[in-house]
Structure formats: C-alpha cells, structure tokens
Image (spheres, rainbow, N blue to C red):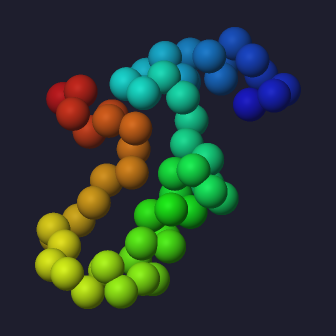
Amino acid sequence: MENHPEEAAAFVATIPQRRVGDCEEEDIGRFVALLCSDASLREWPEYLLLDGGQAYLG
C-alpha cells in the first residue's frame, strides 16, 4: 500500500469503516484471542465476517 498510495486510497474508499484492519492487535488479533479464550465456549454463529462492513454493501 505504501508504494501505491492512489490505489490504496481507492481500496480503502470501498471499505465502510474507511480503514484497513490491523492483523496483529486491534482487529484480527483480538478476534483470534477471543476464539482461543474460554469466552469462545459459548455458542457462535455459523460464520463471522471480519471485512470492515463490505459484506453489507450488497
């Protein structure tokens, strides 16, 4: 993304949250930590989307 700022901006504009997720801590990392914790023993939906809201654009 750093090498192609115009393409990166166009991509980010398609994401409702207007940002790219952080894989290590803020976004994906917290989700993985949740799945590894005792809290994941509760019922979960069939699938969870971590797409910044893109699935709801239809």
Q: Position of residue 23 (x, y in %)?
A: 61, 55
User: Please, which residue is most extreme toward the front here?
Assistant: 38
In this rendering, would 42 be left or right of 28? left
Q: Residue at x 40, y 77 (%)?
A: 35
Q: Position of residue 11 (x, y in %)?
A: 54, 24
Q: Residue at x 26, y 86 (%)?
A: 41
Identify the image quadrant of the N terminus. top right
Q: Position of residue 32 (x, y in %)?
A: 48, 71
Image quadrant where residue 17 sits: top left
- Residue 26 lies, with reference to residue 12, above or below; the image says below
Image quadrant where residue 37 sits: bottom left
Q: Residue at x 40, y 38 (%)?
A: 52
In this rendering, would 48 be left or right of 12? left
Near-viewer residue (1 or 38): 38
- Residue 22 lies, with reference to residue 38, above or below; the image says above
Near-viewer residue (21 or 4): 21
Identify the image quadrant of the C terminus. top left
- Residue 25 lies, with reference to residue 15, above or below; the image says below
In this rendering, would 21 be left or right of 35? right
Q: Position of residue 57 (x, y in %)?
A: 24, 27
